[in-house]
Amino acid sequence: MTHSALRLRDQLASGEISSREATEYYLKQITDQRSLGAFVHVADDAMEAAARADEAFAKDRAGIGRLHGMPTAFKDLNDVAGMPTTFGSAAVKHKVAVRDHSLVRQLRSEGVVILGKTQVPEFGLSSYSENLVSDPSRNPLDPTRSSGGSSGGQAAAVAAGMIPVGPGSDGGGSVRIPAAACGLLGLKPSLGRIPSDVVEGYSDGFGAPKLTVSGPLARSALDAAMLMDAMRGVDEYLPLLQSGFAEQLSGLKIGYSAQSPFESAYEISLDQAARDAFTQGRKLLARHHQVVPAKLNYAGDYPETFAAVWTSGLKDMPLDDESKLGELARDFRRRAQVRSTEQSQQAAARIRQIAADFVTQWSAYDVILTPALATTPPQLGHYTQGSADRDYMLQCQYSPYSSMVNVASVAAITVPVSTTKDGFVMGIQLISPRSNEGILLALASQISM
């Protein structure tokens, strides 16, 4: 089976490969690689769904969706009708969903065949996909290491060839972190670019910008563009790349910086692999663009303000057994509960000010370049050997450049650019202060491995 999701789409759309053939192949990959812990639930009706896709194709080839017959999976944070949703937590009952999440509904309308649900951290809070519900998601590049989070199971599944492409979600780096950890491309779109993300508005209950958006994890810019179009229900990004836009794009002013807004609270440093990737990224981009140092000055109160906004939703989250919360979620929930409504509203107002400052500074350039991650992926269990404060600090030190993009509501992409002698694929992050996902995909097409 091809490694290109776009090529597979074309084969499915032409009838060269049936959905049943593709589904059978990927289900075998899931079975053969179950030790990676990517999947927490495998659909028992996937072959029946594939057969229905083939029957629909035979009846009306012109009426098929953008991803007709394409096998994929969803994070275990998204309800999929007929499958249990655990949210990665032992503190809630794992009920079988009676209806699809809005993103699932959109992609089902585009013809996907759903193979199951993939591993996440508890309530999607962490940059590692380990919880008290099932086995941790392991990195296909080295199964002793983390595949990242919160889309860790999705990233492992795509990187290991269990699914051709995967929809994820990103509230503080949850698409980009696992994509970078597993050697994939990960796109975090701007807030509202995917309609299903803003069904309930653009702000949280306290007035902060909604942090979480949906985005693709893929092996290539073309595959990511294909999935983005299906997630939106609009043909835009794939036609743009296929038009030769990436080949013609040149002369952008790209500002690079390894500064992080977490530096006021934690020591932030890059290991040699991250430094090498950052250097390689600058070299690759300089072939077509003006790459210059970016002068940035981040607000010193960002770490505590972001933490307050990030954890606010846990305050009133309904639980079935609070005693079964993991330590990080329990601590975050306790802190949210002692915070007054006025304090939460103040944090929301302040994060909007910080977001505006981010965008103002970044807008002196067409694109901002940062490292994707500060180090190679850590060992499983790296984060959970101490207190919740230590856990959170280690996460911020591993992924110090991701959450600021969610706060600013703009678009960013992580792109693999180098490989270490130990086989880890390292990447860079590109941020578009003007939320131009097309330019980010084109840059990824120019430089990715």
Image: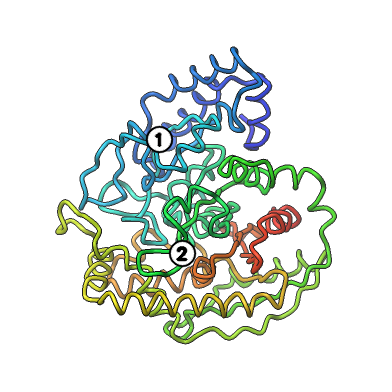
Is any part of residue 188 visible from this angle?
Answer: yes
Crowd class of label 1 (few under 14; some 14 to 19; many from 20; radius 10 Å): many
Crowd class of label 2 (few under 14; some 14 to 19; many from 20; radius 10 Å): many
Is any part of residue 145 visible from this angle?
Answer: no
For numbered disc 2, what is the local secondary structure? loop
Image point 53% across, 53% down: which residue?
182
In the rendered structure, the answer to whether residue 178 lies left or right of residue 297 reads left
Q: Which quarter of the figure is the N terminus placed in?
A: top right
Label 2 or label 1, whichever comes before in sequence order = 1
Please, is residue 416 above or below residue 29 in the view?
below
Name the one closer to the observer, 326 or 368: 368
Which residue is label 1 attached to? 116
Which residue is label 2 attached to? 172
Tag 2: amino acid: Gly
Rendering coords of residue 367 (x, y %): 69, 69
Please name the colour scheme applied to the rendered image: rainbow
Tag 1: amino acid: Gly
Rendering coords of residue 417 (x, y %): 67, 59
In the rendered structure, the answer to whether residue 104 lies left or right of residue 15 reads left
In the rendered structure, the answer to whether residue 130 lies left or right of residue 355 reads left
Image point 42% across, 61% down: which residue?
127
Image point 51% across, 71% down: which residue?
404
